[in-house]
Amino acid sequence: MRRNQTQESMRQRVHFPNKLLPYLLLAPQIAITLVFFFWPAYQALEQSLYREDAFGLSSEFVGLENFVLVLEDPNYVNSLEVTAIFSLGVAVLAMAAALLLAVMADRVVRGRGFYRTMLIWPYAVAPAIAGMLWLFLFNPSMGTLAYLLRRAGVPWDPVLAGDQAMALVIFAAAWKQISYNFIFFVAGLQAIPRSLIEAAAIDGAGPARRFWTIVFPLLSPISFYLLVVNTVYAFFDTFGIIHAVTGGGPAKATETLVYKVFNDGYVNLDLGGSSAQSVILMAIVICLTVVQFRYVESKVHYG
Amino acid sequence: MTQTTKLLAASAAALFASVGAAHAATDLQWWHAMEGANNEVVETLAKEFNESQKDYRVVPVYKGKYPDVLQAGIAAFRARQAPHIIQVFDVGTGVMMGAGKAVKPVAEVMKEGGVPFDPKAYLPGITGYYSTSKGELLSFPFNSSSPILYYNKKAFRQAGLDENKPPKTWPELFETALKLKSAGWPCGYTSTWLTWIHLENFSAWNNQPYATDANGLNSLEPKLQINRPINVKHFQTLANLQRDGVFQYGGRTSEAKTKFTSGECAILTESSGGLGDVIKSGIEYGTGSLPYYPDAQGAPQNTTPGGASLWVFGGKTADEYRGIARFFGFLSQTPIQVRLHQASGYLPVTLAAYEETKKSGFYEKNPGRETPILQMMGKEPTDNSRGVRLVNMPQVREIQNEEFEALLAGKQDAKTALDKAVERSNAAISQAARTIKASQ
């Protein structure tokens, strides 16, 4: 559907009488991209080739040494693994939960608006606050839910148990993203023609069958879009949550790539190494997006 | 020009100058990390100084927690927007000492400002820590603390222990914690700041080396020595007690304090600066000295200062430095120091303030408040107990914490954890020292 529309609009080309106007209209966007993306990206690239003291009093050109050090660091490999588990966990959990909630909310007849508003609400919560919220619930010394877990005999101690800490940040990060995914799934569900589903129902297809053969494939463009967005979210926007809940610990169990960039640059004052990591991170995200568009998108059904 | 007009012009100029001076009080930015009650102390100090004279105005700015203030200061310096005075915690001392031209030594500021300043008036353990190996004072000691022991009297009674006899040594503490646990208390012992209390102060208090070259005071690239048998024995015991639920780890900084104030853990080792929260919790508490190992030679030696000092950034005008010198002179006055000590719970940093507080009977009324001072002043410091100074102390602490967490989670034994901490820290120190050397 969407592709047809874009093709049509391509055909009816808009002609601007003034040659300058389109550039002028684009200028704010371009300026923002230049200042907030290209400039810092360039600085990171430059900094990654230097070794500098914290106060910026001296810097020494070291070529690719920072990259070599980063790639030789066993903690960097650990951080890659952590990021892979974390991102996959967040994306799968946030999307599956959102889809389930969207399908349920779509069926509700009375109070539909109320349910939707309530489900969208968590998106407005700042990451650091979402992190604190989960921390308060699950902190071993003061958390209410941690207390209940312990009473139930679960040895709950995310301060030392790495897998529990990981589970906690995945849940917190996914919880915050569910709302966003929910909005898109609800919109996607509304775009599916009722007649298709009714026809299938008349042919004797049960609710599960209707979902897997009609609804799910028709939602694939949105699911694909959300997969990209959720991966980027898990990579970059979850810093606040991790910082508030675990601080990358225990023993680096929740230190994602972005958190390591922060930690090495901000706490350990290794600016060159930190920049090298952010350059690598940039490359990873570019690759991931390309792969997603190349291979996953070819399987997406655009209707 | 007639005589009258000349006179008029001169008086106008004089008037202008005096008005100008009254308005152009030089602002001195002071970035700090003091929260709550301590923040009020800082605000009051600045206000009193500003009212005591007309030429300078100290502007205190709260910039977040200790690490945040340091990072903000560094970032501001890089952007050529550095404040005049910055409060840096003990861990950041090595970072600031490696800052070279970015910092102006306090001794120099005071001398140029013409303000008499006698480092000997300060507690020796404290000035020693903030001075170069040649004895030049680099930063102004502001608030100092030392780790002490807190215990829950009710828990002691319940376990049939003498509630007025806190454990003095580590073996005694571990045994007491076991007794408390078997008497049904949920947790025997917990501790805040494992790196500060169980490594840095542990070494000083037991008169053991933490690193070569007088714990880094005499070199940019010392090698850590925290994997000696006494360290291994200590951490293995902690790990075993954690496994049995007798000891409970709370986190890397002061998180464990809530385990004590909530009544969960019966014994706590924490900064003397944490006393306020313990009092506020309403728990029936007692205090004692930091434990030591009786078989360690020279133990107990002395503890090292925690807390923070005030650093002066470089690149300011002579006038601004004069103002800073006057402000530090103001802070050194005995009545100010006495009030700082009694109101904030930090140690008095001048000897006169200590004597004055003692004379007033404050320590009789507030038992436990003298313990950290006695710990720090008890003996002339040795090479092992003057303090630890590493150019990248925050990073080294991070590494140590990671290895401790893996140890306490039962993933490795104490020998492995400490060996790895030494190896990783030494590599990080070499890297950091390289950039510092290049900048000097």
Image (spheres, coloured by chain):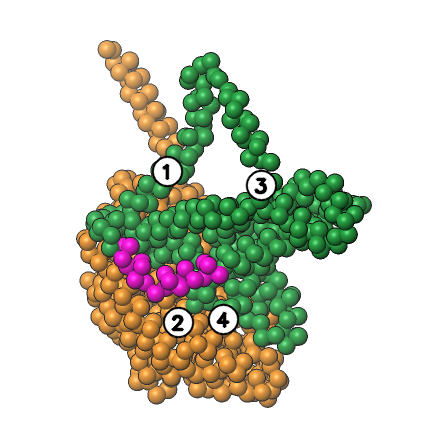
Chain colours: A green, B orange
Viewport quadrant of the N terminus of chain A: top right
Tell me the chain of label 4. Answer: A
Which residue is the site of mark 3? A302
Mark 4 or mark 3: which comes first in sequence? 4
Residue B66, given in percent of the width and then of the height, sits at 42, 56
Q: Which amino acid does label 2 sit on?
A: Glu
Regarding mark 2 in the picture, which secondary structure is present there?
A: helix
Residue B403 circle label: 2
Question: What residue range appears in magenta?
Answer: A66-85
Seen at 58% across and 50% down, the residue is A177
Label drawn at residue A38: 1
Residue B239's image quarter? bottom left
Question: Label 4: which residue?
Answer: A160
Q: What residue type is labelled 4?
A: Leu
Which quarter of the figure is the C terminus of chain A placed in?
Answer: top right
Disc 3 residue type (three-letter)? Tyr
What's the CA distance linking mark 1 and mark 4? 40 Å
Disc 3/disc 2 C-alpha distance (Å): 51 Å
Q: Which of marks 1 and 3 is in front?
A: 3
Looking at the picture, how far across and down is residue A158, in whole percent? Answer: 53, 68
Residue A79 within the segment the image draws in magenta: yes
Report whether B330 appears left or right of B282: left
Q: Identify which residue, B96 or A129, lies in the foreground.
A: A129
